[in-house]
Amino acid sequence: MMIFSSCETDVNIYTDGEETTIVYGYLDVDADTNYLKITKSFTGNAIETAPIYSASNYDYKLDVQLKGRFADSPNAVSIAVLDTVSVYKPYDPNSIFYSGRNQVLYYTTRKLKENEEYQLTIRRNDGVELTSKVKTISGSTIRKPYLSVSFESPVSNSIEWSPNTVGDLAAYYEVIGYFHYKQFLQNGTDTTRYTMKWLMGSGTGEQLWNNSDKRLSINYTPKDFYARLQADDNIINNSPDFVGRIVEGFEVVVTSTGEELYNYILIQNSGSAIQDTPEYTNIENGMGIFSSRSESRKMLIVNDLTINTLERDYPQWGFMRVYN
């Protein structure tokens, strides 16, 4: 997705006629498994050539290593040798990796540590060696809301969180809310779970930091919840009279992004009328981006007042209260 985000279809990313290795991925201290996508350059029409597996993938396994301190040996630097897995990812325009076909990803299941530097080394069969370094960032603790959330107030409210390591701010933060609910036919027993996604706010660490409270925060308007739910595809297309829905909860997800990925996004979206967009990479002897991120989650109870409003003011949506 990142390589072919441009409207241009004639893509040439060779360097002086030589093959270029392309790396995309990030280290996530919260993940059980960390993945990297490693491919090679090609010339020609991207739309025609990208689906051809051999055009952008190596026909052998690269030697890929990650060096640093891991949770299973925190007092000593060691090396994790990344293995490969073939996966099929359905098409998703928001995916960091190519979608809609089989892909080979390099991965490690060794647990990473916060605020540690890791060196990536990739060796090709022709002797070319690629390197990159990245420092993992701290996870966050979501402080507010504490246990429950209400969407009744017409005035601004806030999501607040603090980094697990005091003063360790990430380059960029994004806060997304997920409204979870169950849907069922009122004359049946089968239920299906659905989620409404709400981008609640984002910004750099410096922009969102409140020095007096030692927290980061974004502001949002609670009443916007109903407008966003009204625009939800499932609510629009699947709300006949015999459909019932039950609220399950509201999940807040705070994603912290490393400086490398933030810089990459800034440069790739800079645009210029007088010069080509510069290429940003932190891969020595290659192209792409190797960065870090952290994702913190908190599930909240949806306040009774909000459930009452859903039942009373929006009966066409079929939300109902569950009585114990």
Image (tube, rainbow, N blue to C red):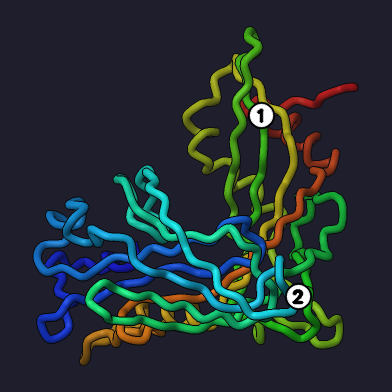
Q: Is residue 267 visible?
A: no
Task: Give the structural element (helix, strand or loop) at label 1.
Answer: strand
- Which image quarter holds the C terminus? top right
The type of residue carrying mark 2 is Pro
Q: Identify the residue at horizontal 69%, vertical 63% (top origin).
A: 220
- Give the left or right position of residue 80, taking residue 208 as reference: left
- Give the left or right position of residue 297, taking residue 240 as reference: right
x, y percent for residue 249: 74, 41
Q: Identify the residue at horizontal 37%, vertical 53% (top origin).
A: 93
Question: Which of 135 and 324 lies nearest the eye of the viewer?
Answer: 135
Return the residue at label 1: 182
Residue 55 to residue 256: above or below: above
The type of residue carrying mark 1 is Lys
Residue 105 to residue 100: above or below: below
Task: Give the structural element (helix, strand or loop) at label 2.
Answer: strand
x, y percent for residue 223: 70, 52
Farthest-out residue, top: 187
x, y percent for residue 197: 58, 49
Q: Quadrant of residue 274?
A: bottom left
- Which image quarter holds the N terminus? bottom left
Q: Identify the residue at horizontal 32%, vertical 61% (top origin).
A: 61
Residue 276 to residue 198: above or below: below
Disc 1 crowd rating (10 Å Cα; few below 14, some 14-19, many 20+) is some
Return the residue at label 2: 163
How far, Cα to Cα, is label 2 from label 1?
Answer: 33 Å
Farthest-out residue, right: 324
Residue 280 to residue 225: above or below: below
**Dot 2 or dot 1, earlier in sequence:** 2
Disc 2 crowd rating (10 Å Cα; few below 14, some 14-19, many 20+) is many
x, y percent for residue 51: 20, 51
Count of number-bearing discs: 2
